[in-house]
Image (cartoon, rainbow, N blue to C red):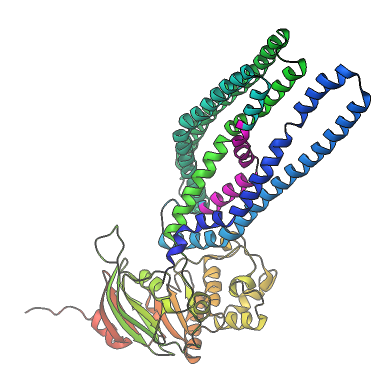
Amino acid sequence: MMNGTKRSVVRKAFDACRGAFISTGIFSFFTNILMLTGSMYMLQVYDRVLASGSIPTLVALTVLVVILFMFMGVLEYIRTRVLVRVGLRLDEQLGSITFDAVQMHAIKRTPNVGAQPVRDLDGIRQFVSGPGPLAFFDTPWMPVYLAFIFMLHPMLGYFAIFAGIVLFIFAILNDVVTKKPAAKANETTMISNALTEESRRNAEVIGAMGMQNAIRARWQKLHADALTDSTHVNDRAGSIAAFSKVMRMMFQSGMLGLGAYLAVLQEISPGTMIAGTIILSRALAPIEQAIGQWRPFLAARKSYARLKLVLDDAPIREQPMELPQPKGRILAENILVNIPTVEQPLLQGINFKLESGEAVGVLGPSGAGKSTLARVLVGVWPPTRGGVRLDDALLEQWNDTQLGKFIGYLPQTVELFSATIEENISRFEPEASPEAVVEAAKMANVHEMILRLPEGYGTQIGDGGSALSAGQRQRIGLARAMYGNPVFVVLDEPNSNLDAEGEAAVIHAINKMKETGTSIVVIAHRPSAIAAVDKILFIKDGVQLAFGPRQEVLDKILQPPAVRG
């Protein structure tokens, strides 16, 4: 059962931070009011202190200004810390969900997702914790400054409004001219990064088959396109930012000139002239800051949209209650697997039953759907119709964490983690029992091989297990599948990278698991892998053609066609 409210999980995370945003707005109100301190001090010094020559007045004003500036500094510090904490809270609320969504989309093979959601969350957190939001919190207080300038003199107020309108037009122009190019630049960068990651994963193939120049040329073209789009965005945003900065400086000088003109006409005092210029500078600063932060804002907004889309497409499942320890009975009920882009079902009409301690071998030509069946049996791919039952309960009725302890899985392509052999075998269980790790290794007949490694079970195997051979990785993966004595184990091509000794280890492991009551599914091409199974399931083009005792099914599928007389 999927929780529909999770579809707005990103929005809910921001809503949970609403109080922090409101408090930041309140702090921004007082901070922006206190921003008038400098201009008021200047006005009082020019119009009162210099006119009266009173030193005590100057001292009193100076002490008051120092206190107000210190108070403003504290408020500025607090609102900055609040935004940093907001970023951390968003990461805490969305981090685990985002990580799970990445895994779910990897299972679904969703194109162009990869690890991008994690990077998007980092981008959102960095923007929220940085100076960008402060510019947007300060901009709404611009009318307060303009109203204050009006109080000094209407002509100064009209001039300030004109300056604000001009800079606001620059801000809108910045959005218009950079929005689409920024989206294109981001897309091309993602494609270029994806090719970089694919090249890293396939480095051996690229090097062995002389693909280096071709792949590099392809990457250089994508990277050049990304750089061109990024440069285009930077040029546009930079030119607008430069013009807006120049215009702001011109308006400040213009305000000073207008103030001087009014002072000559004795309509305002020299102090008012200086104060009006300072206040205008403060009124226009948030707009200029917003223009400068516009590209990070667009990037954060794009990251928000992508992250929301990814999490919407991978809603978090509500975990059911834990069920009693299963015995390992497996029932596949009329399994149908369809994907939208393919008209022909990947699997259809799959029905079989396994009792505890039984092993079934799944045979069939390449592309028959054997690996798809393996993913369905361990709960990685939910079937379109039908289901898999473990001790009468459908897999989706089990708690995910609890179910994982009862299932062992050796995929066709074994992926290990950059950690120690012990951590990989123990499935990164926080307080894994060394005895259980060794037991799994011995059942997989890999204990002696591990002890021959430099650090034994503490050997670091490198990125993806690069320090091990393909056969060693497969045998470590087999030990991982057997760790904790699972009641149901699925082995997909367990001997594909093994020599005769390794194949013997697989047969030994299957027999050991059968003795402990584990039900086993072995998917194989080579007959040696099914030497220890009790039954055979034969599928072709995703359709089950035979299921029954091993020799009976083998005789049926291997029987030569009758010769016609």
User: Does residue 17 lie above or below 357 as drawn?
Assistant: above
Taking the spot 69% from the left edge, 36% from the top edge, the residue there is 32
Regarding residue 247, the answer to whether it shows in the image is: no
Towards the viewer: 124 or 193: 124
Specify the quadrant that holds the N terminus: bottom left
Name the residue at the top extreme: 264
Dividing the picture into quadrants, the one containing residue 368 is: bottom left
Name the residue at the right extreme: 55
Specify the quadrant that holds the C terminus: bottom left
Bounds of the magenta span?
A: 117-143
Towards the viewer: 281 or 187: 281
Towards the viewer: 297 or 256: 256
Q: Tell me if 36 is positioned left or right of 108 in this view.
A: right
Q: Position of residue 125 (x, y in %)?
A: 60, 49
User: Does residue 487 lie above or below 74 as drawn?
Assistant: below
Q: Position of residue 115 (x, y in %)?
A: 52, 54
Q: Position of residue 171 (x, y in %)?
A: 53, 29
Q: Is residue 309 magenta?
A: no
Q: Tell me if 496 is positioned left or right of 77 in this view.
A: left
Q: Tell me if 7 is positioned left or right of 152 in this view.
A: left
Regarding residue 111, the answer to whether it shows in the image is: yes
Q: Position of residue 51 (x, y in %)?
A: 86, 17
Towards the viewer: 87 or 15: 15
Q: Is residue 141 magenta?
A: yes
Predominant SS of the magenta segment? helix
